[in-house]
Amino acid sequence: MTLMNGKEYIDSLRELELHVYFMGEKITRVVNEPMFTPHIHTAAMTYELAHDPQYQDIMTATSHLTGDTINRFTHVHHSIDDLVKKIRMMRLLGQKTGTCFQRCVGLDGLNALYIITYEMDQHNGTNYHENFKKFLTYVQQNDLMSAGAMTDPRGDRSLRPSQQKNPNVYLRITEKNDEGIIVNGSKAHITGAINSHEIIVMPTRAMTEGDKDYAVSFATPVTTKGIKFIFSRQTNDSRRLQSPLDAGNPKYAIVGGEAIIIFKDVFIPWERVFMAGEHDFAGNLVETFAGFHRSNYGGCKVGLADVVIGASHWVADAHGVAKVSHIVDKLTEMISMAETCWSCSLACSYEGSKTTSGAYNISPLLANVTKLNITRLVYEWMRLAQDIAGGKIITLPSEKDILNPEIRDVIQECFTGKEGVDVNDIFKMLRLVENMSVGAGLPEAMHGAGSPAAQKIMIARRSGIDKKRELAEKITGIKKDDSFENIVGMPENEYWKKTSNR
Ligand code: SF4
Ligand code: FE
């Protein structure tokens, strides 16, 4: 059994030889690559905190498969308490890093596949759940980070996967044989892909019979032959190479380190396959995964809110306005919105339920409500952070200018706050607010775990509108209301006749 710390996680990546394309170069070793280092440090925090005695209750769990103590990022939730601790873990990590710590997508993939492979086997007599449990045990025992790969590029979105002119816009099975399957295609926007150990692939949407080659799920090491990564450009990323101050959050990532993963004739042995043509379960897997991931956002993004609220208060205080009423009002607004999202995520967990597999799922309706709130409220609290920080966040010169002896003094004069505050600290805090409120974290809040339209579809589908109609019908007397009849001791129509004769 392994419970890696942050340094051991980084060392475990050193051994891996990948094919990563970034800024016109091919990179095979991701550790020590300056542009990747902050992403790796961020994911390393998910390992490091598991060794901190004050966080062990949140960061570790007991494996239901082996009884061993494992990192909670490899755990399949088996109680409401597990679901609640998961969301507490996410807020904690957001607070510690101020960014996306990447490891949750794999965690959600593990949980969704545990539930759906069980249901598939019950329905079809297949053996996917046993395959999956073996993989899960391997992940838990080696404390691995898995990238969850769901989204396909999707080409012409008015067409189904099998109708696309270019079949590679959806990942698909191109061959099945006695040993396993061969897949081709790609996955897009995959968080933490280049600094994971494994990739967990899942279908991107519900599938029909004609799309069954696209109903595919499996796990494979990041080093598998035929897999290549293209790492994304991120807001102000090259500042990292120029100056820690200019980077804003120099130790940790800008966002989740998203990458495209290309699969060219990739062989997957049957023991690593969790779905291969069961098109009628593809939609369930997508929904279950998306529910888990959407429920997270009131944890991780609220952890980020805690950081940006703290930074906003710090900046206001450094300029002598922390007690001015409109600043207090804005900070209070930010706190209220963040805690609303936190309440949503907690509610997802507390309203969770046991599935037939024995694992626990969150409340899917509340998970979608949580994420829909995030697509709006993160922008609102970041807008207020910019409002409080003032124009200085867009005027602050580069560190090179700040250090230039010819202009250093005048820059310091322009940015000095109240007496006793080191102007160098003001520089740092302004850059942090800029990093968090302007960077790629905003579109991530919009599109991560699916765009708002996807959440609205699920909310509409799960809202129980018929039950709500019935409530109105009973109150107006359109439908029979047994409780009312019991209260008045007679059928409702008789009651109305009697009272209208009065
Ligand atoms: Fe985890 Fe949040 Fe990043 Fe998704 S956006 S991987 S839930 S930190
Ligand atoms: Fe995300």
Image (tube, helix red, strand yellow):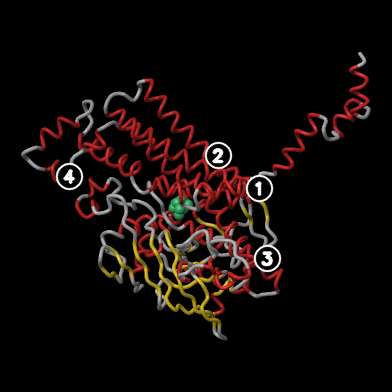
- The amino acid type of the residue labelled 4 equals Glu
Q: Tag 4: Cα neighbours inside 10 Å, few (<14), some, or many (≥20)?
A: some
Q: Amino acid at mark 3?
A: Glu
Of tags 4 and 1, the one toward the viewer is 1
In the image, the residue with mark 2 has its CB under 8 Å from the nearest atom of ligand 1: no
The answer to whether residue 387 is seen in the rendering is yes
Q: Secondary structure at mark 1?
A: helix
> For mark 1, what is the residue?
462
CB contact under 8 Å: marks 2 and 3: no
Quarter of the image with the C terminus is top right
Relative to residue 148, is residue 7 drawn left or right? left
Q: Secondary structure at mark 3?
A: helix
Circle number at residue 119? 3
Q: Position of residue 308 (x, y in %)?
A: 37, 38
Q: Name the residue beneath numbered marker 2.
A: 343
Label 2 or label 1, whichever comes before in sequence order: 2
